Amino acid sequence: MKRFWTKALGTVLALVLGIVGASEIWPERAAKLLLAGLNLSAGLQSETVETSFGEVHYLEGGKGQTIVFLHGIYALKEHWIDTSRYISGDYRLILLDLPGFGQNQRLDPEQYDYQRQAHNVLETLDAIGVEQFHIAANSMGAQIAGQLAVSIPERVQSVAFIGSPVGVSSPTPSDMELAIEAGHKPLVVTSYDEYEARMSWLFPKEPFIPRPIARFWASNEVSNAESNAEIWNAVASSNVPKLEELATGIVQPTLVLWCDEDRIFHPSGAAVLAEALPNATLVNVSGCGHLPMLDKPAETARILSGFLN
């Protein structure tokens, strides 16, 4: 991971040198400039599209068949940049900020129900002009991907669950599931200390992220603490079939990439999901947690590319 950031930042050295001294004075501006440089180095452009629920931000790059990347709860489109750079030469990539997340305006709580989220994602893709597409999805995004794969099979060409998905019953309960039973919500943060503590839930070893970007992301999430709590409750109360139940109807080729050190959903769930899917490829990866696209971007891209090929 650190090797990637060093290489990527090197491609925008002049930009970095120009803002390092200003990062303490204008931290948000510094973070945005760094992110813009990283997008550029990965061959991605920032785009927006108008929908009935407001403007949606996304990154796009590459040519060929389309891969749509869907992040998890409280995550960002930028979390896919590291992995996407390894495959952008062969595919057209669409990295979405899911409606109501990231740079997009917050929506009313009922918009975060899984059924509504799937509808909003489809409307977004229609507005962009995406017809047929592969999906690579993480965590909450995987539930949305499963619903799309079942509801519009003629458009979804394949599904890749990158990191553990929501909606699978693991024989062994995860650390997060045990924490929730005890009345805690490790992924919902209300302070900078809680944000930092959450890193140990997501990663066995926290990946390197440039300081201005890390602070910018943390600040945004803490400032949205009240809204994030409402989103958590809306998602948790969604009355839709879980991914494990949808799995038998997902007939497309499907990749299940699950990390052995995932604390959010236990790795024992990987075999459960793979068994339920009619056309699954299961890959267990060691040395990563809930977000392999950040933990092991090169390996994640290699596995995804091999599956797509």
Image: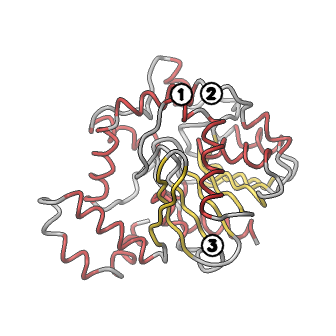
User: Badges 3 and 2: C-beta atoms under 8 Å apart?
Assistant: no
- Identify whether 65 is placed above or below 78: below
Mark 2: few/some/many CA within 10 Å (<14, 14-19, 20+): some
Whole-percent x and y of residue 175? 53, 30
What label sits on residue 234 in the rendered view? 1
Q: Nearer the viewer, residue 305 or 71?
A: 71
- Identify whether 275 is placed above or below 134: above
User: Considering the numbered disc 1 on the image, is that residue within a helix, a strand or a loop?
Assistant: helix
Whole-percent x and y of residue 74? 45, 42
Q: Nearer the viewer, residue 187 or 123?
A: 123
- Which residue occupies 40% across, 57% down? 207
- Which residue occupies 45% across, 27% down? 230
Mark 1: few/some/many CA within 10 Å (<14, 14-19, 20+): some
Whole-percent x and y of residue 243? 73, 37
What is the spatial separation of the Cα atoms under label 3 and label 2, in whole angstroms? 32 Å
| Residue 31 placement: quadrant | bottom left
- Which residue occupies 58% across, 53% down? 70
Q: Which residue is mark 3?
A: 92
User: Badges 2 and 1: C-beta atoms under 8 Å apart?
Assistant: yes
Amino acid on which disc 2 is placed: Ser
Q: Nearer the viewer, residue 298 or 251?
A: 251
What is the spatial separation of the Cα atoms under label 3 and label 1, in whole angstroms? 32 Å
Amino acid on which disc 3 is placed: Arg
| Residue 237 placement: quadrant | top right
Q: Residue furthest top?
A: 182
Counting residues from the start of the chain, the first of labels 3 and 1 encountered is 3
Q: Quadrant of the C terminus?
A: bottom right
Q: Which residue is mark 2?
A: 238
What label sits on residue 273 in the rendered view? none
User: Considering the numbered disc 2 on the image, is that residue within a helix, a strand or a loop?
Assistant: loop
